[in-house]
Amino acid sequence: MTATTETREPEIGLTFEKVWAMFQESDRRMREMREETDRQLQETARQIREMNEETNRKMKETDKRFGALDNRFGELAEHLVGPNIMEKFNALGFHFTDISTGRRKIITGNDKQRIAEFDILMENGESSVGVEVKSKLSERDVKDHVRRLEILRRHKDTMGDKRKIYGALAGAIMTDSVRNAALKAGMYAITQTGDTVKIDIPEDFIPKAW
């Protein structure tokens, strides 16, 4: 019996075409992964933008509400301070005869441009006192009021008005640091006590005349 010899074709290894196809498939998958990653990143960025926009919107709404509330407290403080303030300053020897409340506007020139506003402005033939009233005062309010008084001084100089100008800060809440800053700037510190006001005048206090 004669043995049959089976002839096998030699196995063919990786060809250029197979390798190229593998690279193409790998590149396709990488592109899909990059596209999916980009899509996810864009979606995340969109969600973050929306969250930021919503947060900013809520913050603005909150600021608006607090601003309106602070204005109401400020108006209330003005009503509490106004009826007693001139009497208190006259007791110090000022003898004011005129008082304006509710954001008196200071106008300059022919263009009627508003240059400064005061919650309370008391005047007589020799001097003026500009008062800033807040529900809660800050050291920034002290600096702002100094600038306001400087503006009023320049305005009166252009009109030939040489009356002395003094400053005062009144607040329902006034911390020691704010009080000290006001006194250091040469301004009167006015605090609310019950249904009246008190002018805090230390022994070494010297009011500044602008």
Image: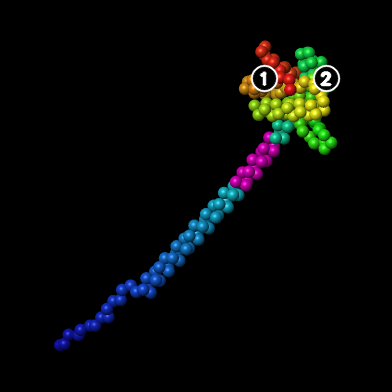
User: Looking at the image, which residue is at 52% across and 56% down?
Assistant: 40
Q: Is residue 184 above or below residue 50?
A: above
State the quadrant of the C terminus. Answer: top right
Query: SS class of the residue under badge 2?
Result: loop
Q: Please give left or right for residue 12 compared with residue 141 in the image.
A: left
Q: Nearer the viewer, residue 150 or 19?
A: 150
User: Looking at the image, which residue is at 33% across and 72% down?
Assistant: 14
**Residue 10 in the image, given as x and y percentages of width and height:** 27, 78
Q: Please give left or right for residue 110 compared with residue 40 in the image.
A: right
Q: Is residue 56 magenta?
A: yes
Q: Which residue is mark 2?
A: 124
State the quadrant of the N terminus. Answer: bottom left
**Residue 89 in the image, given as x and y percentages of width and height:** 77, 16
Q: Name the amino acid type tagged 1.
A: Leu
Query: SS class of the residue under badge 1?
Result: helix
User: Looking at the image, which residue is at 68% across and 26% down?
Assistant: 142
Of callouts 2 and 1, the N-terminal one: 2
**Residue 202 in the image, given as x and y percentages of width and height:** 67, 14
Q: Name the amino acid type tagged 2.
A: Asn
Q: Main secondary structure of the magenta part?
A: helix
Q: Kindly tell me whether residue 118 is visible in this rendering.
A: no
**Which span is picked out in magenta?**
52-66
Q: Residues within 10 Å of mark 1 (few under 14, many from 20)?
A: many
Q: Is residue 156 magenta?
A: no
Q: Which residue is mark 1?
A: 183
